[in-house]
């Protein structure tokens, strides 16, 4: 009975993972397909991989995506950590009010966020790189705050006071005592913001104007003409890189966990 | 024996290759208050979880009223547990928590209502039925947890350090209440604790465990007065444990001085462990006792003074109603009845552990 | 205001600049016509048959997709708990790893699988089953939406189930509850916060996922998101588009108020 239940559990997990990963498998296979048609197998090739680096359009979009995601998530992390520290010190009513506004970009439909920002940007600046960056920061910060806030609430406030008592000035105490305690939350907030920026299409689509393209908007633009196989190759590369990084991080943190248990 | 309700037969259990219980045999009688006592990691909680059905032993079996229940899941056993962290269902009020097991057994509404009332009265919580668990103090939550288990009329109630999270005063009060509840409901209690005082106060029988092995079983008095090895002596109460050599029956040499004692059956000149309780030592004038030493500290503990007397390189702990001046030289004496002689441990497993 | 709360100053200014003012902008557009005169017409436009139909379809689709996500996610979380996969760092990573591939590309691949001469029908023919013409249907669109948002639902529920103390589940077993009772009486009620934030994270985006509708339904089905997008990009009637957006926003706020009074905290913030 136990065995049967375990078997069903495993089978079910397998089916869900199959659903989630089957399209990715198809993508990876397509990236090696020597036929431009998406459904016919035309033999193995690596030419789409060469093509990725030869296409200025793709390299530009990749570069723009990386720059925007990286700078937006960095700025959002600084802004968000400061905000979380400030908000957590507020009285209950202002705390609730600020958190309610903070939640708007997260719960609202992204199309509404994109449109409202576009309407506002158009009033005082040309749509382009800057407007996309500002928009990304705007939807990134709430996630940073949500990641940092629990750590702040767990943090022992008296530690900061103890540092001051022992002669540390405010700046020193902040960097040496407060920040290290928030480290986990800050890191996860940053990665979360980065992932969301990388994956965003809708907000970028409405705030980008002509001329600027991220990978998402470039792919969307190609939809009607048919996606260039180089895109599959690029996705496969990104997927492989992320997979390797995650495995390495996982092994490393796994070792650390075990070390903690051993002591 | 027909009054044995539960028998553990050669139980072994390991986690991640670490042996937690090592071929444990145990019999529990009907209506007994048994306490498993030992330091953390000694296997006492795992033993309880095996009885409750939350863990399956690697080897051995659990016999309940003559039937093998080793493979039975917890919901099919006539055994209920009171957990260390109360484990009340946070989304149900006190009444619903207590009624949980009864509703599953499809009892009538009036029966459930009566039972709740009775159980709340039993644990001194009348009138708390509609409260949510979060609004109760730790002690109150634990009372509800006990009530929740007892209404199911289990044959055995398992209690896993139920008072561990409470403060000292409340703990002492709850100990007395548990004894009262036990008398009233008349079921078998199996109690797990690392607190030797708790065990001595409540139990009919104490089972001292260490490293997955039973070190000693017996009544509170026999465990306290006649520890069978240095681990038990050290774990139960405070003791002076010192090396000695058995000269012959009823004569032991400690620190170069011969003491009369009552123990027989040791080998001639066998090295032994000698256990002497602090309250059994008496301070006398210099030269009038077996040993002379210097008083190096004296602390007033309310009912007595705790005095440390250094004799060559050993520091004797003494509880005395009379003070002694630090720095003075005094004599120590003891009556033969109060000297407890033990064999030196042979295996490493039985060695003294001081990890608490 | 104490000194520490001043730290949030820059972000509060940012919120006013980039959340509150844009919010007012969209309201302004919604309540005026091209000449700047005040009107309710853009809001009332929701009741025109085309828009009303899109809204009804959106709500229907979002509702069913959310229910399907819940029905798929709970057994998965329970299965993971059974097999002791909780608390392992890779569990969540495996679920969100697909997010690192652009969702449009993933949807295209999914479409290839579902297409009339795709992998799925290939498997069907091997099994001797009749082929299913799924491509460009409402079913395909819903599969696409479930595919997009299922990980969010799983992660939300996973996090709230992970917060349930094992002792509580053991206590229920101890009192005689079987697996089903444990699920319905203990796990389900105690994971409601995660379930609610999962619903918010799946329901709202489902209503507006115009890209998914375009790809998976081949432009045959109009969600409210498609209508709004067209008003801004093709028809260029920003006032009407804003009006419909405001209605959508009200809808979202209502469903939020209905599902929860807490933060959408359970889902995303605990991923990393």
Image (spheres, rainbow, N blue to C red):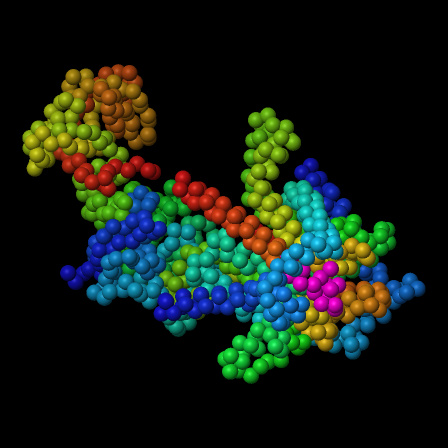
Question: Residue at coordinates 33% horizontally, 58% vertically from top-left?
Answer: B55
Span highlighted in magenta in the image: A218-235
Q: Is residue C160 above or below residue C214?
A: above
Give coordinates of residue A1: x percent, y percent: 36, 69
Give coordinates of residue B157: x percent, y percent: 31, 58
Give coordinates of residue B68: x percent, y percent: 24, 65
Q: Nearer the viewer, residue C159 or A229?
A: A229
Residue A76 shows up from this direction: no
Question: Residue at coordinates 22% horizontally, 31% vertically from top-left?
Answer: B241
Question: Residue at coordinates 28% horizontally, 25% vertically from top-left?
Answer: B307
The answer to which image quadrant residue B5 occupies is: bottom left
Q: Is residue B252 above or below residue B134?
A: above
Total marks shown come to 0
Check the image and name the residue furthest to the right: C35
Looking at the image, residue B33 sits to the left or right of residue B87; the answer is: left
Looking at the image, residue A3 sits to the left or right of residue C67; the answer is: left
Question: Residue at coordinates 70% horizontally, 46% vertically from top-left?
Answer: A71
Q: Nearer the viewer, residue B187 or B65?
A: B65
The answer to which image quadrant residue B154 occupies is: bottom left
Give coordinates of residue C144: x percent, y percent: 63, 69
The answer to which image quadrant residue B210 occupies is: top left
Q: Nearer the viewer, residue B106 or A179?
A: A179
Looking at the image, residue C220 sits to the left or right of residue A154; the answer is: right
Q: Main secondary structure of the magenta part?
A: helix
Q: Nearer the viewer, residue C125 or B83?
A: C125
């Amino acid at each position: 009975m136990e065995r049967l239940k375990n078997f069903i559990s495993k089978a079910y997990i397998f089916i869900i993972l199959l659903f989630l990963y089957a399209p990715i498998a198809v993508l990876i296979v397509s990236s090696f397909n020597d036929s431009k048609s998406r459904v016919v197998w035309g033999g193995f090739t690596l030419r789409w991989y060469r093509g990725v680096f030869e296409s200025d359009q793709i390299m530009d979009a990749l570069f723009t995506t990386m720059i925007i995601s990286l700078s937006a998530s960095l700025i959002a992390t600084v802004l968000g950590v400061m905000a979380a520290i400030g908000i957590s010190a507020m009285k209950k009513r202002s705390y609730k009010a600020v958190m309610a506004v903070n939640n708007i970009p997260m719960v609202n439909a992204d199309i509404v966020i994109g449109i409202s920002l576009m309407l506002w940007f158009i009033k005082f600046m040309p749509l382009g790189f800057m407007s996309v960056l500002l928009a990304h920061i705007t939807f990134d910060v709430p996630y940073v705050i949500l990641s940092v806030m629990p750590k702040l609430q767990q943090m022992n406030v008296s530690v900061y006071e103890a540092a001051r008592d022992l002669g540390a000035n405010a700046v020193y105490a902040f960097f040496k005592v407060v920040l290290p305690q928030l480290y986990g939350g800050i890191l996860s907030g940053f990665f979360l913001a980065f992932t969301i920026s990388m994956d965003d299409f809708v907000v970028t689509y409405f705030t980008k104007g002509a001329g600027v393209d991220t990978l998402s908007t470039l792919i969307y633009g190609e939809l009607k003409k048919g996606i260039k196989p180089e895109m599959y190759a690029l996705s496969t590369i990104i997927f492989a890189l992320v997979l390797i990084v995650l495995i390495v991080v996982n092994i490393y943190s796994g070792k650390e966990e075990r070390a903690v248990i051993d002591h | 024996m027909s009054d044995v309700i539960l028998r553990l037969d050669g139980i072994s259990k390991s986690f991640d290759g670490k042996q937690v219980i090592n071929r444990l045999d145990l019999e529990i009688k009907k209506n007994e208050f048994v306490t498993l006592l030992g330091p953390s990691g000694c296997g006492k909680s795992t033993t309880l979880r095996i009885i409750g059905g939350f863990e399956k032993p690697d080897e051995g079996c659990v016999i309940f009223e003559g039937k093998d229940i080793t493979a039975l899941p917890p919901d099919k056993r006539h055994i209920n547990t009171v957990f260390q962290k109360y484990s009340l269902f946070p989304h149900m009020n006190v009444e619903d928590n207590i009624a949980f097991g009864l509703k599953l057994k499809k009892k009538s509404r009036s029966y459930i209502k009566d039972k709740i009332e009775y159980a709340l009265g039993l644990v001194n919580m009348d009138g708390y039925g509609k409260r949510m668990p979060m609004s109760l103090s730790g002690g109150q939550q634990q009372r509800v947890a006990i009530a929740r288990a007892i209404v199911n009329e289990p044959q055995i109630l398992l209690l896993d350090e139920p008072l561990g999270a409470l403060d000292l005063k409340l703990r002492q009060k709850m100990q007395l209440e548990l004894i009262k509840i036990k008398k009233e409901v008349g079921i078998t209690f199996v109690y797990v604790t690392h607190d030797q005082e708790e065990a001595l106060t409540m139990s009919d029988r104490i089972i001292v465990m260490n490293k997955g092995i039973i070190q000693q079983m017996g009544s509170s008095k026999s465990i306290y007065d006649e520890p069978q090895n240095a681990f038990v002596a050290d774990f139960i109460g405070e003791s002076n444990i010192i090396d000695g050599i058995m000269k012959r029956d009823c004569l032991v040499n400690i620190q170069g001085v011969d003491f009369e004692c009552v123990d027989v059956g040791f080998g001639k000149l066998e090295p032994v462990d000698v256990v002497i309780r602090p309250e059994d030592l008496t301070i006398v004038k210099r030269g009038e006792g077996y040993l002379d030493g210097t008083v190096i500290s004296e602390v007033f503990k309310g009912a007595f003074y705790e005095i440390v007397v250094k004799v060559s390189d050993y520091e004797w702990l003494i509880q005395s109603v009379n003070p002694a001046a630090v720095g003075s030289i005094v004599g120590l004496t003891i009556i033969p009845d109060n000297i407890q002689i033990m064999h030196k441990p042979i295996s490493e497993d039985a060695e003294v552990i001081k990890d608490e | 205001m104490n000194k520490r709360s001043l730290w949030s100053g820059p972000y509060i200014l940012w919120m006013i600049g980039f959340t509150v003012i844009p919010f007012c902008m969209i309201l302004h557009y919604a309540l005026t016509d091209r000449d700047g005169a005040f009107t309710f017409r853009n809001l009332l436009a929701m009741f025109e048959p085309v828009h009303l139909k899109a809204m009804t379809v959106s709500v229907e689709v979002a509702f069913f997709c959310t229910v399907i996500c819940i029905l798929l996610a709970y057994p998965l979380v329970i299965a993971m708990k059974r097999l002791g996969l909780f608390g392992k760092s890779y569990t969540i990573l495996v679920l969100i790893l697909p997010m690192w591939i652009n969702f449009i590309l993933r949807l295209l691949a999914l479409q290839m699988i579902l297409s009339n001469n795709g992998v799925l029908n290939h498997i069907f023919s091997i099994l001797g089953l009749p082929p299913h013409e799924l491509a460009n249907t409402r079913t395909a669109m819903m599969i696409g939406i479930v595919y997009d948002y299922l990980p969010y639902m799983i992660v939300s529920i996973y996090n709230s189930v992970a917060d349930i103390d094992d002792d509580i589940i053991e206590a229920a077993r101890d009192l005689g509850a079987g697996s089903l009772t444990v699920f319905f009486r203990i796990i389900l009620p105690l994971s409601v916060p995660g379930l609610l934030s999962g619903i918010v994270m799946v329901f709202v985006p489902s209503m507006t996922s115009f890209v998914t509708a375009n790809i998976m339904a081949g432009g045959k089905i109009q969600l409210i998101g498609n209508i709004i997008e067209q008003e801004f990009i093709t028809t260029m009637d920003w006032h009407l588009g804003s009006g419909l957006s405001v209605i959508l926003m009200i809808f979202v706020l209502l469903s939020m108020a209905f599902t929860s009074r807490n933060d959408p905290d359970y889902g995303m913030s605990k991923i990393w």
